[in-house]
Amino acid sequence: MGFLEGYLTSKRIWNHYQNQNANFNYPDGKMPANTKEFITENRKWIEEMYQKSSSDSYWLHTWLLYR
């Protein structure tokens, strides 16, 4: 079944790969400082939201995805 799924979604997988490569393949090989800062701040915010409402399954799963 996994092989079949890969075969049937191969175009979408390739498109996703191309999008990610275009978005994250920077000319100098380094992520711009403002992008890195945004990602860092976003991660802190998600952790803070999880700490405030750890019983909420949404924030638990969001935090687990980041971890």
Image: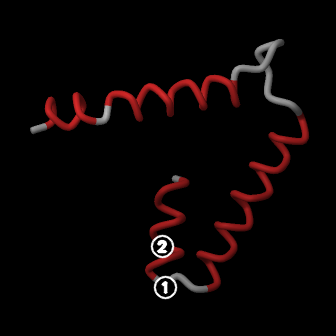
* Residue 52, position as x, y percentages in the image: 64, 84
Q: Residue at x 15, y 29 (%)?
A: 3
Q: Which mark is residue 30?
A: none
Q: Residue at x 50, y 33 (%)?
A: 16
- Above or below, 58 against 10 in this view is below
* Residue 58, position as x, y percentages in the image: 49, 77
* Residue 22, position as x, y percentages in the image: 68, 24
Q: Secondary structure at mark 1?
A: loop
- The residue furthest left is 1
- The residue furthest right is 34
According to the picture, the residue beneath numbered tag 1 turns out to be 56
Q: Amino acid at mark 1?
A: Asp
According to the picture, the residue beneath numbered tag 2 turns out to be 60
> Label 1: how many residues lie within 10 Å, few (<14), some (14-19) or many (20+)?
few
- Above or below, 21 against 67 in this view is above
Q: Quadrant of the N terminus?
A: top left
Asked if residue 61 lies left or right of residue 51, the reply is: left
Q: Amino acid at mark 2?
A: Leu
Distance in Å between CA atoms under marks 2 and 1: 6 Å
Q: Secondary structure at mark 2?
A: helix
